[in-house]
Amino acid sequence: MHIVIMGCGRVGSSLARGLERRGHSVAVIDINQDAFRRLGPDFQGKTVKGVGFDRNVLRKAGIEKADGFAAVSSGDNSNILAARVVRETFEINTVVARIYDQGRAEVYERLGIPSVATVRWAADQILRRLLPSGSEPQWKDPSGTVRLIEVHADPGWVGTRLTAMQRKANCQIPFLVRFGVGTVPDSETIFQDGDLVYAAVSSEQVPEVEEIFGHAPTER
């Protein structure tokens, strides 16, 4: 996967190094050239000086072939503007914006842009929203045989009942997060764009469940 990150502060540089360790290609955008020093001498990705909502800067960073975008600069307005440009102009579905203001974060989630507010921020939260698979479990039992995982669901699942998704992946979906609020699905609940799905699975099921939900369904 190719991931573009706007902001090379502590969060952005940590994300960039973490993604690169996982074998992904990374491009980092920052208005301050000196900020790229945080990436360290071993960083093999691309660095682009400029503002992350400038279309030409984004193109230099490879946004047209990107699989995901994270806006993690120190400014709320810059982050959300960049996220919207990437989502609406370049039609990148996997977009995350770091927002300092919790109230703003909830508003932007309602616009379909997942946001991570500083008060609940952790690097693995952003990684789970960028990567379609391979994330750490949210919970696992002491024996390690059962776990609760946050699963990336391909946009092709939008409009599908959660009951059908459960049957397809042979797993249980005890809850999902919609617009920043947890929801326990019932028989009528339909998967919507921006929903975060949580699946209860056995450890050996994880690769299969991530593979099924990571691609559009062949039939509903």
Image (spheres, rainbow, N blue to C red):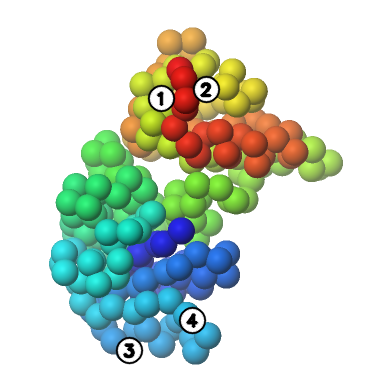
Q: Is residue 151 above or below residue 164?
A: below
The first of marks 1 and 4 along the sequence is: 4
Q: Residue flagged by tag 3: what amino acid is it? A: Asp
| Residue drawn at x 75%, y 38% as measured from the top left | 204
Q: CA distance from mark 4 to mark 3?
A: 14 Å
- Alpha carbons under labels 2 and 4: distance apart: 39 Å
Whether residue 102 can be seen here? no
- Report which residue position mark 4 lands on: 43
Q: Which mark is residue 168?
A: none
User: Dot 2 lies on which element?
Assistant: helix
Which of disc 4 and disc 2 is earlier in sequence? 4
Identify the mark nearer the N-term, 4 or 3: 3
Q: Does residue 17 appear left or right of residue 93 in this picture?
A: right
The residue to which callout 2 is attached is 165
Q: Is residue 136 in view?
A: yes
Q: Pointer 3: what residue?
A: 34
Cβ–Cβ under 8 Å for marks 4 and 3:
no
| Alpha carbons under labels 2 and 1: distance apart | 9 Å
Q: Residues within 10 Å of mark 2 (few under 14, many from 20)?
A: many
Image height check: is 135 above or below 11?
A: above
**Which residue: 56% across, 33% down?**
212
Left or right, 57 with respect to 127, comes to left
Q: Residues within 10 Å of mark 3 (few under 14, many from 20)?
A: few
- Residue 202 locus on image (x, y percent): 73, 34
Residue 191, label in figure:
1
Residue found at x 20% / y 71%: 57
Closer to the chain start, of discs 2 and 1, is 2
- Residue 140 in the image: state x and y as whole percent: 72, 41
Amino acid type at mark 4? Phe
Is the residue 35 above or below the residue 3 in the image?
below
Cβ–Cβ under 8 Å for marks 2 and 4: no
Q: Amino acid at mark 2?
A: Met
